[in-house]
Structures are given as structure tokens and as C-alpha cells.
Image (cartoon, rainbow, N blue to C red):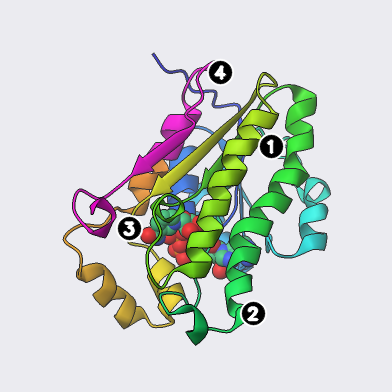
Amino acid sequence: MTTVNTDACVLVTGANGGIGTAICRLLVTRGHRVVATARNPAKLETLADELGAALQPLALDVTDRAAVDGLGEALPAGFDRIDILVNNAGHDTGGRRLFDAGSSDQWCEIVETNVQGMIRVTHALIGGMLERGHGHIINLGSIAGLKPYATGTAYVTSKYAVHGFSETLRLDYAGKGIRITEIMPGLVRSGFAAQRLGDVAQAEAFYDSFDACLQPQDVADTVAYAIAQPPHVEIAQLVVLPVSGPDRS
Ligand SMILES: NC(=O)c1ccc[n+]([C@@H]2O[C@H](COP(=O)([O-])OP(=O)(O)OC[C@H]3O[C@@H](n4cnc5c(N)ncnc54)[C@H](OP(=O)(O)O)[C@@H]3O)[C@@H](O)[C@H]2O)c1
């Protein structure tokens, strides 16, 4: 039997995108208070208008070191004790190209968001979790963190790092009441490919070229499942794939 601690307050990074928005919607529906963070404040306000007072929007660029360091003080009243962190912000801007075809700055920016961003936000919030003796950190990895593909150097590197970070954090805090979950999806139909390729039509054609894609809601369901487990149960890793497609080969 599972129990849902709906008192838990959740902070989601990358809440303006397909998976992040789906997570916010589902967790609010389940009765959680949610702090939705991403860079674009106007989009966050639209989500807040949709979901009401249980969701508080907070503009946060995970690559902005000063902003992340000040995250604890920036949390809205009533949402200032984060029990669950969902490290979801991530991208592959300019990816799906040979390594020499992109600039080193561009590749490093992917790692800066997907890895350093995750590390900084986790560091900003884990102290409070440890003080209170409980917490849950959920990292959006990828099947790319288990299985590399050609033309994915920076993104694959970043998701291997998410995997290593999640595995090691779990060892560091064993017995301290902190659960660490890594969700590793295969292909999800979201804004991700348009961000990667810089072209919406090309992105749609990319998704259409596969028999099946996951929907953001499918990934949100796995996050809610991990959260809903009783305190002695830790969903350590969850690989979720579309039933057919490149991830199965
Ligand atoms: N789509 C897939 O096939 C797939 C598969 C496996 C894993 N994933 C992972 O799932 C996560 C979510 O991806 P998605 O598919 O939902 O992509 P998406 O639709 O492009 O959404 C990405 C989100 O990240 C935010 N973001 C980007 N850079 C940020 C930064 N520096 N600081 C804060 N927020 C930032 C974006 O909003 P703003 O622009 O407003 O900041 C947006 O909300 C990523 O970590 C991705 O690697 C995706």
C-alpha cells in the first residue's frame, strides 16, 4: 500500500517545459504545494493562473549562481520548507551534431544547466532537508545516462553525470531520511527537440519519425509514484521508455 504525504512542499525546476509543467499539474492535483521555477516569468504566471494558490511561481535560472545561492530566502511564505526537490531543468541546445560541429561554449552550456545547475540547487536545499530529518530529491536523468548515442557528446556526458551524482548522493545520505530518485526516460514529446534543433517544424518531424513517444504526463506519473511511496521505500532508479523506438535497441 502506498501513502501520499500531501503536506510535502515540492520545488520543481524547469517548470515551463513539457515534463516540468506536467509534474506541477499532477502534484497540485494530488494536493501538494508546489514552487514552480524556470527562467521565463510570464510562462510561470500562466501556469500559476491555471493551478491557483497551491502553486507559487518563482523565476530561477539554475545557471545563475547568485540566484541559486539566494534560493532559500527567495521562497514564498508558506512554501519556504522544501520537502521534495525535482531537478528537472535541462536542455540539449544545438545538440544532435558531431562534437567538432558545435562550439565548446555551446557544449559547456548544456553541462552548466544539466549538471552544475542540478548540483547548485540541490546544495541550496539539502541543508534544510537534513535539519528536518527528511527529504526527497528527484533527478531527471535520461536513458542517455545509461546508453550513449552518436552526436550526443555533451548531453550524454551531462546525463551520465546526473546518474553518478544521484548514485553517490544516495550513498552519502543513507540513513539520514533523504530519498534520492533518478528518473531515466526515453524519448518524450515535449519542447525539448525544438529547443535542441531551434526549429519547431523540424522538431515535430523528428518526433513523427518514431512509432511511439512518451508524453510528459507519463514521466510525471513516475515522479508521483516515487513520491507516494511510504517513507521506508526509496525508488532509486526508474527507466521509462516508449514501447517502440530507438531507446529499446
Ligand atoms: N524530452 C525528452 O525526450 C527527454 C528524455 C529524457 C530526459 N529528459 C529530461 O527531462 C527534463 C525536462 O525536459 P523536457 O522534455 O520537459 O524539455 P522542455 O520541454 O524543453 O523543458 C525544459 C525546461 O527547462 C527550463 N530551463 C532550461 N534551461 C533552464 C535554466 N538554465 N534554468 C532553469 N530552467 C531552465 C525551460 O524553461 P525556461 O526556458 O522558461 O527556463 C523549460 O521549462 C530535462 O532535464 C531533459 O534532459 C527529456
Question: For residue 187, which numbered disc appears in the image?
Answer: 3
Residue at image location 44% in from the left, 79% down from the top: 98
* Marks 4 and 1 in Cβ contact (< 8 Å): no
Image coordinates of residue 21 in percent, x first then y, are: 47, 54
Image coordinates of residue 162 in percent, x first then y, are: 56, 50
Compared to residue 11, the image places residue 189 above or below, namely below
Per the image, label 3 sits on a secondary structure element best described as loop
Q: Residues in magenta?
A: 222-249
Q: Is mark 3 within 8 Å of ligand 1?
A: yes
Q: Quadrant of the C terminus?
A: bottom left
Q: CA distance from mark 3 to mark 2?
A: 26 Å
Q: Which residue has dot 1 on it?
A: 82
In the figure, residue 150 lies in which quadrant? bottom left
In the displayed structure image, the side of residue 18 where residue 243 appears, left or right = left
The crowd level at tag 3 (other Cα within 10 Å; few <14, some 14-19, many 20+) is many
Q: CA distance from mark 1 to mark 2?
A: 33 Å
Q: Nearer the viewer, mark 1 or mark 2?
A: 2
Which sits in the foreground, 121 or 24?
121
Q: Which residue has dot 4 on it?
A: 231
Query: Which callout, 4 or 1, points at the residue further toward the start of the chain?
Result: 1
* Marks 4 and 3 in Cβ contact (< 8 Å): no
* Marks 1 and 3 in Cβ contact (< 8 Å): no
Query: Which callout, 4 or 3, points at the residue further toward the start of the chain?
Result: 3
Compared to residue 27, the image places residue 146 above or below, namely below
In the figure, residue 174 lies in which quadrant? top right
Query: Which amino acid type corresponds to the residue marked 3 in the rendered image?
Result: Leu
- Residue furthest to the left: 211
Query: Which amino acid type corresponds to the residue marked 1 in the rendered image?
Result: Ile
Q: Nearer the viewer, mark 4 or mark 2?
A: 2
Query: Which amino acid type corresponds to the residue marked 4 in the rendered image?
Result: Pro
Residue at image location 50% in from the left, 19% down from the top: 233
Which sits in the foreground, 18 or 114?
114
